[in-house]
């Protein structure tokens, strides 16, 4: 991998130098065959023969890779990468005979003939020839011309030519393979960013109550940067779009650098609606700092959790209990002390006595007692005692 990087730098900076540091001369190319690879090379209409190491090729040479990979540096700084199954012709123009070809243009666009169609690469692109011709653009743009029709394929998009002269009206989002070495080389960041943003989008949507998260004010709370965008209003939102997707798209739109805010907003959700992953959408808006974008989304979700999460349950403050009151004796119990019981703080509920009290004894009204003047004279005392004695005797006498 280190040696491949050296070749790339040499090809671009030193104007087409290959594995050697000498510039590639006009009408020549320098091929570098990876260690352990099986490659066949045919020079100027000669038969294909096994080749190893590094060597200089001339116009008209053919290269076929049976196993492994190889890279070819051209005179204008362009670079061609081939791998297992690839077969190309180094004519004028270049031609893709079979399978895959990775083209990196140099000082000028690179034109490649593929099954009757002409593909011009101004940037970095993967070309494929099997049942159909396809072109996927990593950087820059690709122009596909088939018969009388022409289609420009911008970066991060692809197209297919199923037969000569048949082209779609527009390109579609690039469909990458996470296991493909070329896709990983140019889209590795987009792949990882897609995983992170998709997880946050689904999680945010699931946290919200059904029907919530649909207003412009709600998203202004989550993304304060939207306060600086007067064009952001309710008309930009969609009732059918999940709130998680709106949040991710809004974060990309405020971080983008192409056009006005409304243009970025429309471009983000149009590209996403065509099937692009969030990583590709972010790169398409030239949001190159993936960590900063993820941080913005995390702050929006975590810092404003009150907007969608239920309020937390607050535990009551526990105070020490007051002193227990002294329990008043019930009618059935006998006080342990002769001291009167303290008065209760609140009136107690009356209880039914255990037994009916005995009837009161009514005594006859007694005349006022006048002490005798002479102690030896009984005066009125004797008759009074007789009355009391007779009364008590009548009450206590057995029936």
Image: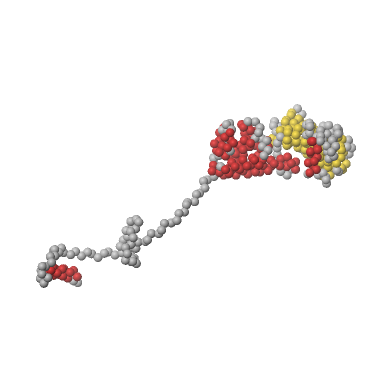
Which residue is at a point 80% across and 43% down the rendered structure image? Answer: 3
Which residue is at a point 58% across and 37% down the rendered structure image? Answer: 224
The quarter holding residue 93 reads top right
395 sits left or right of 198 in the view:
left
Q: Is residue 285 visible?
A: yes
| The N terminus: image quadrant | top right
Indicate whether 207 appears above or below 61. below
The quarter holding residue 182 reads top right
Q: Is residue 95 visible?
A: no
The quarter holding residue 270 reads top right
Q: Tell me the colour scheme of the image.
A: secondary structure
Q: Position of residue 241 (x, y in %)?
A: 59, 38
Which residue is at a point 19% across and 64% down the rendered structure image? Answer: 362
Residue sticking out furthest to the right: 46
| The C terminus: image quadrant | bottom left
53 sits left or right of 340 in the view:
right
Count up the numbered dots: 0
Judging depth in this view, the residue of 140 and 177 nearest the camera is 140
220 sits left or right of 162 in the view:
left
Q: Position of residue 377 (x, y in %)?
A: 10, 71
156 sits left or right of 90 in the view:
left
Judging depth in this view, the residue of 373 and 91 nearest the camera is 373
Judging depth in this view, the residue of 176 and 338 nearest the camera is 338
Which residue is at a point 75% across and 34% down the rendered structure image? Answer: 123
Q: Position of residue 308 (x, y in %)?
A: 54, 43
Q: Position of residue 174 (x, y in %)?
A: 70, 37
Residue sticking out furthest to the top: 148
Indicate whether 384 appears above or below 46. below
């Amino acid at each position: 991998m280190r040696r491949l990087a050296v070749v790339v730098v040499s090809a671009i900076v030193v104007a087409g130098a290959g594995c050697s540091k000498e510039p590639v001369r006009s009408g020549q190319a320098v091929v570098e065959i990876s260690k352990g690879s099986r490659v066949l090379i045919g020079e100027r209409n000669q038969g294909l023969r096994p080749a190893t190491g590094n060597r200089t090729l001339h116009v008209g040479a053919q290269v076929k890779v049976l196993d492994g990979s190889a890279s070819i540096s051209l005179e204008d700084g362009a670079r061609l990468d081939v791998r297992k199954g690839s077969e190309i012709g180094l004519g004028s123009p270049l031609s893709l005979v079979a399978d895959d070809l990775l083209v990196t243009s140099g000082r000028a666009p690179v034109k490649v003939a593929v099954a009757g169609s002409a593909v011009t690469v101004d940037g970095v692109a993967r070309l494929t020839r099997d049942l159909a011709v396809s072109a996927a653009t990593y950087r820059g743009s690709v122009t596909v011309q088939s018969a009388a029709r022409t289609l420009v394929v911008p970066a991060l998009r692809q197209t297919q030519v199923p037969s000569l002269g048949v082209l779609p009206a527009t390109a579609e989002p690039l469909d990458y393979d996470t296991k493909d070495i070329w896709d990983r080389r140019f889209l590795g960041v987009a792949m990882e960013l897609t995983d992170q943003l998709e997880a946050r989008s689904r999680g945010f949507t699931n946290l919200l109550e059904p029907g919530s998260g649909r207003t412009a004010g709600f998203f202004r709370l989550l993304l304060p940067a939207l306060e600086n965008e007067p064009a952001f209003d309710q008309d930009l939102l969609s009732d059918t779009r999940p709130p998680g997707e709106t949040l991710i798209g809004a974060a990309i739109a405020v971080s983008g650098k192409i056009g006005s805010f409304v243009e970025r907003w429309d471009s983000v959700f149009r590209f996403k609606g065509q099937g692009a992953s969030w990583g590709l959408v972010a790169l398409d808006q030239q949001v190159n700092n993936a960590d900063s974008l993820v941080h913005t989304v995390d702050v929006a979700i975590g810092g404003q959790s009150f907007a969608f999460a239920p309020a937390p349950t607050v535990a009551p403050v526990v105070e020490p209990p007051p002193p227990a009151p002294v329990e008043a004796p019930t009618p059935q119990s006998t006080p342990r002390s002769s001291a009167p019981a303290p008065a209760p703080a609140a009136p107690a509920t009356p209880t039914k006595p255990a037994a009916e009290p005995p009837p009161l004894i009514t005594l006859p009204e007694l005349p006022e007692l006048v002490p005798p003047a002479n102690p030896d004279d009984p005066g009125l005392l004797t008759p009074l005692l007789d009355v009391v004695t007779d009364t008590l005797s009548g009450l206590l006498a057995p029936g």
